[in-house]
Amino acid sequence: ISVLIAKINKIRKMDALSQRRRLDTLFVVTAVSLLVVGAAGFLVPTSWAVLFDDGGAKAARHIQGRLHLKEIIRLFSAFLMGQACVIWSARRVVDGAVRRDMTRGLFCSTVLMTVALAQAHQRATTLSRGAHGVAFVLFFAALSLGYGWFGFYQPPAVFRGLGHEH
């Protein structure tokens, strides 16, 4: 019986490790995406024109002519790049409670981003109604689902102190 219990515990730990790897993958996807989008906006604020108005040259000219809009894009982009660094580093965190709290925090922020982007898209006065705008909304909605899954639906095995496997 003790051998059977040991095997069951080993299987549970393997499942938890698998869940942790999936959460780490979600962290990587989020970090890389935020870094790419943030770097594009920081270095070339007009690259975000695809998200606004018609997504074409008109939007780029609109952004180009408004210094305050370029600076707001740069500020937000800098924040996105900082978040990417924090999320990338979170993969090394061993403490399950910290990972859980971080995952739930990311869930809240991605839900709020999804709501804000969906409202902007629906109004179509600022966010592009084209594929770029839809993709932006869907990206944050997918992140919300991923972080919600790990943060609330499947937390026990994911957030136990598993040790450092990297």
Image (cartoon, rainbow, N blue to C red):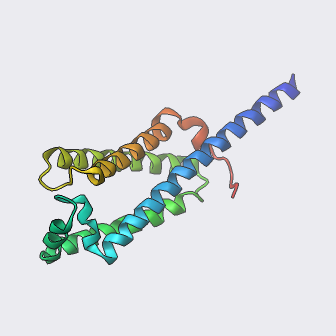
Q: From where the camera sits, is residue 44 visible?
A: yes
Which is nearer the eye, 80 or 60?
60
From the viewer's perspective, is 91 left or right of 111? right
The total of numbered circles placed on residues is 0
Choose top left, top right, bottom left or bottom right for residue 16: top right
Q: With respect to residue 30, does 70 lie above or below?
A: below
| Residue 110 place in picture, x, y as percent | 35, 49
Q: Is residue 20 above or below residue 9?
A: below
Instruction: Name the residue: 37% across, 49% down.
Output: 139
As displayed, is residue 94 above or below residue 88?
above
In the image shown, does 157 or 19 lie closer to the viewer?
19
Q: Nearer the viewer, residue 132 or 25?
A: 132
Give the quarter of the figure containing the C terminus: bottom right
Q: Position of residue 115 (x, y in %)?
A: 25, 44
Residue extending furthest toward the front: 57
Q: Is residue 132 above or below residue 38?
A: above
Q: Is residue 78 visible?
A: no
Quarter of the rendering containing residue 122: top left
Rendered-image quadrant of the N terminus? top right
Q: Position of residue 129 (x, y in %)?
A: 21, 49
Residue at the spot 26% in from the left edge and 73% down from the top edge? 45
Name the residue at 53% across, 63% down. Answer: 89
Q: Nearer the viewer, residue 13 or 135?
A: 135
Rendering coords of residue 109 (x, y %): 34, 50
- Image side of residue 20 versus residue 11, left or right: left
Residue at the spot 21% in from the left edge and 54% down from the top edge: 128
